[in-house]
Image (tube, grey):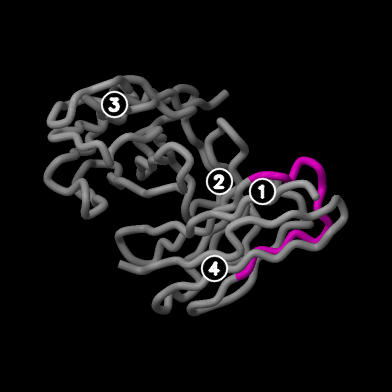
Amino acid sequence: DIQMTQSPSSLSASVGDRVIITCRASQGIRNDLGWYQQKPGKAPKRLIYATSTLQSGVPSRFSGSGSGTEFTLTISSLQPEDFATYHCLQYNTYPYTFGQGTKVEIK
Amino acid sequence: EVHLVESGGDLVQPGGSLRLSCAASGFNLGTYWMSWVRQAPGKGLEWVANINQDESETYYLDSVKGRFTASRDNAKNFLYLQMNSLRAGDTAIYYCACRWVTSPATDLWGQGTLVTVSS
């Protein structure tokens, strides 16, 4: 199975901060990576697929980059509604595997 | 408006069985690959199963192979997950989802249904 190592597991940030979350795959996954946002008690919501394609309706302050084994999610200017947990997902190979999640908290 | 609504979650003893349902409304579920994704209490997300439109292809998490079976009734607009030989480690909220991986369309998730495996 492909292991997805996500870091950090949590971070504290202020509104307006730039936030970067990283996912590393245990083997190459081309660009078959997505990012999901989840708020407490709610289902996940997709932000990005194919590494860098923004889901329709997702604010442009979210961006994704990377290829192969290293991927990043960047929030250029953190907003109050962005405090949530973020998950990466590889879908290159079955079984699909998620990272452990990154909880973004208010500083 | 489009919706997915799961049901069937319950408290079940180890070794027991449960069938989860996922009802689609506002769209034709038969158009899409469908998935089950779970989340143990306080833990991360875990993909469980994928099923294609005509049930000719199914894929499962290794730990549920041989115990869980995904199926669908496109005429009724329903997705199912038959869960047998349940273990404590299967305790989780189970979500059904579609358009959530590679589709350019907006992803669609249910609200989740809680399965608790405990004696």
**Kind of residue indicated by mark 4:** Cys
Numbered circles on residues, count: 4
Q: Are marks 1 and 2 on the same chain?
A: no
Q: Are marks 3 and 2 in contact (CB under 8 Å)?
A: no
Distance between the Cα atoms at labels 1 and 3?
30 Å
Tell me the chain of label 4.
Answer: A
Q: Residue under circle 3?
A: B20
Instruction: Looking at the image, tell me whether mark 3 or mark 2 is earlier in sequence order.
Output: 3
- Callout 3: residue from which chain? B
Q: Secondary structure at mark 3?
A: strand
Q: Quadrant of the N terminus of chain B?
A: top right
Instruction: Report the amino acid beneath label 3.
Output: Leu
Give how far apart the Cα atoms at labels 3 and 2 are. Answer: 25 Å
The tag on residue A23 is 4
Image quadrant occupied by the C terminus of chain B: top left
**In this view of the protein, which residue sits in the foreground, A16 or A46?**
A16
Q: Which residue position is annotated with label 2? A: B105
Marks 4 and 3 on same chain: no
